[in-house]
Image: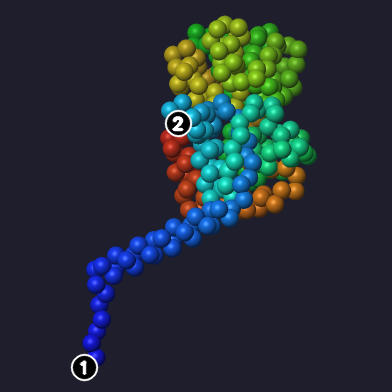
Amino acid sequence: MKRSWFPSPSFKRTLLASSLALGLGSSAAALADRPSIKVVTDPSFVPFEMLDPATGEMIGFDMDIINEVAERAGFKVDLTTMEFAGIIPAVQSGSQEIAIAGITITAERAEIVDFSAPYYDSGLQIIVRADNDSVETIEDLAGLAVATRIGSTSYDFLQEALGNRADITPYPGNSDMYMALLGHNVDAAFYDAPNVSYFSQTRGEGHTKVVGPLYEGQQYGIVFHKGSPWVEPVNEALAEMQGDGTYDAIFEKWFGEAPDDE
């Protein structure tokens, strides 16, 4: 009679260990084969990108997005941080391949860099001190001192809307802008809505408030130098993330509620 053969427990353990070793070896080899791509971000655009003091690493919504995109598109992230005003020039010159920093897609920027498909809907909003009841709209800023961010679309919007009717001061960093507001050096600040809202609910809680409507609906995109071969793989990765629920999970982690698809 033909005898059936059943592997012994020790053989099973040996086989499992060998399979795991082969799998890990293949994964390590695949990871090693991935190109390392220079990615630049802004170190202080919370909650999109910020330094975790406990680990010394950059964290935030954008960081989770780019790391997941890199995994799916097939590259490793070689991350660099710099002030926002230098990010577009760095990508344009080719010293950085990709940028992600809450960067608004504009026609002017699209002339010198390439953008991914939009991955976040935003806009601009006013923040004032909690005791200020005289500012509700952009027109109420006329005659006042207003802080914004150097190189931002909020600065461009203020210049077009108010020109010399307001004392517009662009600051190099978000913290500088908000400290100027809290320190009574300016009457209001005007910047990207999610960042303004985050500050008002955290460090500015009880001292500031967000007022007025959302101005100039905007969309953020990942930035590439002109002709970059990574635009299509990144767009495919973003579409996959939005389709399988990964994007919503990352969004909920940082903002508490998934965006409405309507």
In the foreground, 18 or 106: 18
Q: Residue at x 48, y 53 (%)?
A: 244
Tell me, yes or no, if residue 158 can be seen here.
Answer: yes
Q: Disc 1 marks which amino acid?
A: Met
Q: Does 186 sit above or below residue 88?
A: above
Q: Position of residue 191 (x, y in %)?
A: 61, 23
Number of residues whose C-alpha sits closer than 10 Å to that of mark 2, classed few (under 14), some (14–19) or many (20 or more): few
- Which residue is denoted by mark 1 in the rendering? 1
In the image as oriented, which residue stretches furthest toward the bottom? 1
Q: Position of residue 262 (x, y in %)?
A: 53, 44
Type of the residue with mark 2: Thr
Q: Pick the residue in front: 206 or 235.
A: 235
Residue 240 visible in rendering? no
Q: Residue at x 59, y 41 (%)?
A: 78
In the rendered structure, the answer to whether residue 5 lies left or right of residue 22 reads left
Residue under numbered circle 2: 55
Dot 1 lies on which element? loop
Q: Which of the two residues, 67 or 13, is positioned nearer the viewer here?
A: 13
Label 1 neighbour load within 10 Å: few <14, some 14-19, many 20+: few
Where on the picture, by quarter, is residue 173? top right
- Per the model, the C-alpha gap separating discs 2 and 1 is 65 Å
Taking the spot 50% from the left edge, 33% from the top edge, the residue there is: 57
- Point out residue 52 in the picture as x, y percentages from the top left corner: 47, 29
* Circle 2: element type: loop
